[in-house]
Image: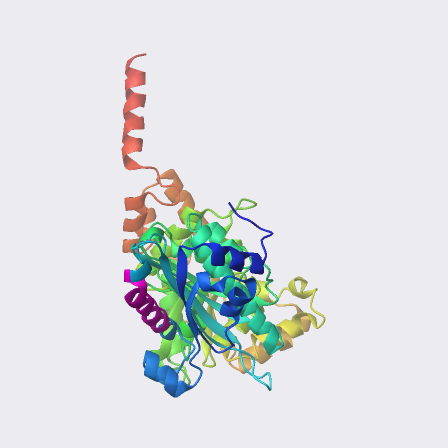
Amino acid sequence: MYEKNLGTKQKALRINLDRRIYGSFAEIGAGQETAAYFFKAGGASGTIAKTMSAYDMTFSDAIYGTEEGGRYVVESRLMKMLNREYNLVEKRLSEKRGVDSTFFAFANTVVALNFQKTNESHGWIGLQFQLTPMGPTNYVVIHVRMRDDENILQQQALGIIGVNLIYGCYYYYKSPEILLMSLMDDLTIDRIEIDMVRFSGPDFAKVDNRLMSLRLVKNGFTDAALFGSDGGVLQPSEALYKKHILMMRGRLRPITNVHIDLISNGQRQFLAEEDVDESKVVLISELTLHNLKAGDRDIDEKDFLDRVDILCSLGHMVMISNHHEYYRLVAYLSRLTKLKSGLLLGSPNLQDIFEEKHYQFLQGGILESFATLFSRKVKLYIYPTLQPDGSVYSCENFRVPDHLRPLFQYLIVNDKIEDIKNYNTEHMHITTDFVLEMIKRGEPGWEKLVPENVAKIIKEKSLFGLPNETNYVDTVKQIHQAVGNL
């Protein structure tokens, strides 16, 4: 049962009084704030076997080894810390108290705000733990960004979320959704952001980390989450560090041949840019929360997973975000990488970008949004659309209000917007809604409008409302039998 009003000190005290829970703490980068809560709560000897902090790089490397690239605030460092400290606890204490205890190792590696307040504060936090004595171990790992503007406040927030993590793993493990929600107890998004979570181990075998990531975005704990082409969750700033990002946004329900044409031609033009290194390019398909919803209904989680599975089968990374406006998306991407990025859009999306009504809440209106959207190292690649009269609508005949035309021309001349060329006109009549309706009706021919392997997955799993072939045949037989009995 979720105890919403339980304070941090109360959580620490309850753990201290639970004689089963015993382990060690290793914290690097912002003091030993999590362990401190347990000491201050009282009865810490019932919980803490050891607490340590190897701040000096030489000491840290001697204990945990070195990291590729020389970075310390990375997931690989956290995992080395967890595994080493947990193994020590088990090695030294299993004989003495292993049959009665559920051991754990808590660790974090973070970089808090420096004295000049010029750095980005973030960190990795994790717990390796048993739920039964002598049982297997599980992991819960999160990545956080600290938003307090004082170092001491960041340390305090890290201590709180550390206690929340340990408490949640031991008392809410049967409901990972509640465990996730409880991580922000006594905190707000103004103080700390959780942009990645990963559950693993035998006791979390049924947990789908993609759904947990979706809930991070839905609950407002972060504005975006990322999956690799293998479906595994990724931490965005680590996965996209020093990468060129090429991104396509859409409902993608399902992805069609026109999307593939857009991607292949847009990617070809992006790779031809002088300041793009092909070896560093990653392709991302983005789904916004808005695009995941069907009208006023909540997000269908199975439908979400179906879309992710299909996109991953094509080798795409997948991002879910709450960045509905493109300028907010670009600001976010610019925080992840300093290299050039590209957005693949249809001409209706560009038309929407030039709608001034979207920027009425900004003091500087459309100019303020464009200052963010086009001042970064980002270029828009526009895929033409087919008009009802058969003509092609592109940047060459783009319709824009007269007072905005000089702005549009400025962006064209300065290479911020470019038409996608060499498109296949045979695909341009395809729309997602049209294909989706064909699939729902079981109408023959839809398979030719999507990539071959996408059609195969949709048919195998009866996705997007596709009538199940067995049920369809049975229904036809019943109809014939009913007619014959008349």
Instruction: Give the residue at x 56% y 66%.
Output: 40
Q: Is residue 126 left or right of residue 461?
A: right
- Foreground: 67 or 1? 1
Q: Percent from the top left, x then y, of residue 21?
A: 41, 57
- Foreground: 392 or 188? 188
- Foreground: 15 or 390? 15
Q: Which image quadrant for residue 102? A: bottom left
Residue at the outermost front position: 96
Which span of residues is magenta-colored? 79-95
Q: Is residue 36 above or below residue 409?
A: above
Q: Is residue 296 left or right of residue 436?
A: right
84 magenta-colored: yes
Q: Is residue 198 above or below residue 468?
A: below
Q: Percent from the top left, x then y, of residue 391?
A: 48, 61
Residue at the outermost top position: 486
399 magenta-colored: no
Q: Main secondary structure of the magenta part?
A: helix
Q: Percent from the top left, x then y, of residue 457?
A: 29, 50
Residue 256: in sight, yes or no?
Answer: no
Q: Which image quadrant for residue 427? A: bottom left
Instruction: Give the residue at x 35% y 70%.
Output: 85
Instruction: Give the residue at x 31% y 56%.
Output: 451
Name the quarter where the C terminus is drawn: top left
Residue 277: in sight, yes or no?
Answer: yes
Q: Percent from the top left, x then y, of residue 38?
A: 51, 64
Q: Is residue 400 left or right of residue 217?
A: right
